[in-house]
Image (tube, rainbow, N blue to C red):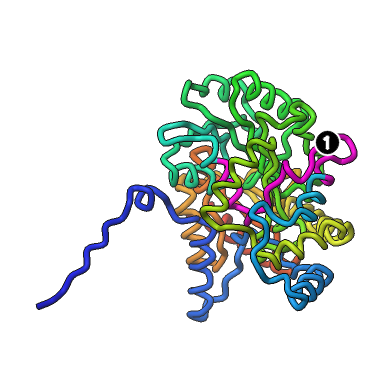
Amino acid sequence: MELRLNFVLSKRVINVSESATVSTSAKAAKMTAEGRKIINFGVGEPDFTTPAGEINYAFEKAKEGFTHYTPSKGYVELRTKISKKINNNIHSLNADNIIVTPTKFAINLAVMAIADEGDEIIIPEPYFLSYPEICRIYGVKPVEVPTNDDFSLNLERIENSITPRTRGIIISNPANPTGKVFSTDEIKALQKLCIDEEIYFIQDQIYEELVFDGKIQDIVEMDPEMNHTILISGFSKSYAMTGWRIGYLASSREFIGAVDKLQQQTITCAPSISQMAAIYALDDDESPKAMKEVFRKRRELVYNMIRDIKGLNLIKPEGAFYVFPSYDLNISSVEFCKKILDSKGLLLTPGSAFGKQGEGHFRISYALSEDKLKEGIALLASFMDEQSKI
């Protein structure tokens, strides 16, 4: 008699989509293994190896025995250094305002802590594709609100989207996928709205060291006690430490105490060795600067090449390491990316992965060598030329 196992999945699992960037990179890896030459413009991490100083320091600390559990909030030394970085000799945050956690899990902690099932979080489009899916994991409704044509925030639309169930607003700044750096006036207005409405303003500034034009507004300035403010950041992009999975969340002491309970009952603590690398990284000023200059040069290269391609339109990004062109073809972004992958071996991320406003766009990561960028954009130009003749 044949035995059959019936697996019953929760709505939580069924309602959550795969990460488009992870799944497309997996597809590229499969095609490469099959012998296809693929240029991967979908990658969301620096192409650099973690700086040697960070690696060596963590390795030595591991040999010294720092391979055990850490305090659930993270090592006090690391949290103190993070608070000093955020303070910038202006504010008075301390270790009690910080919890160290594995990068994206900081977003999970924030959503779990501020919203119950059926509550809402406003997410301006185009957005980091994990924001709405993380909300759905916890039964929270993501309320997607379009930005303006230049990707600046539309405060009127955001304000009109607030309901009695709204618990917060989340943005990435600099923005993924657009590279937009929101102005001081935009952020102050948005933060004031959150304070007035008694909801949380969540700013994910994981790309904070990669700002080429403008600056990131200090969000502690308007809310010194961080009673309505949550700052999320980490070491993945600025120090090429994606695999170390180390980041942090900053907010009021009361809020950090609350999310610490969640961390204790989920992951317990962030990895000890990664925390040691982060301690060293906060004294390493040169590596982020050097990487930033490489990315600045690549941004200019990619921007100048793409703007010369007929049928593509592009707003120059101000930060991060992405460009988000639109195209004039009458096909979906998923179909666009499928066609160019199949015909040219060029992997792009469809704009629809980043919200409805992303339709008609695609994302390019320029976290690749200049040679690969030139080769890939030449393939993009060839593809657009061929499509114009169909």
Q: Position of residue 295 (x, y in %)?
A: 78, 57
Return the residue nearer the eye: 345 or 133: 133
Asked whether the viewer can see residue 12, the reply is yes
At x 67%, y 56%, the residue is 71
Q: Amino acid at mark 1?
A: Ser
Check residue 102 for magenta coloring: yes
Give the left or right position of residue 3, taking residue 369 as reference.
left
Q: State which quadrant residue 258 falls in.
A: top right
Residue bearing the label numbered 1: 92
- Which residue is at the far left? 1
The part of the chain drawn in magenta is 84-110
**Quarter of the figure that contains the N terminus:** bottom left
Q: Is 278 rendered above or below residue 49? A: above
Asked whether the viewer can see residue 314, the reply is no
Check residue 204 for magenta coloring: no
Q: State which quadrant residue 96 falls in.
A: top right
At x 48%, y 42%, the residue is 135
Q: Position of residue 238 (x, y in %)?
A: 76, 56
Q: Position of residue 311 (x, y in %)?
A: 60, 47
Task: Tell me how many marks there are.
Answer: 1
Return the residue nearer the eye: 307 or 142: 142
Q: State which quadrant residue 375 falls in.
A: bottom right
Q: Residues within 10 Å of mark 1 (few under 14, many from 20)?
A: some
Q: Is 266 rendered above or below residue 38? A: above
At x 48%, y 21%, the residue is 164
Judged from the image, the secondary structure of the residue bearing numbered disc 1 is: loop
At x 66%, y 43%, the residue is 204
Give the left or right position of residue 8, taking residue 144 as reference.
left
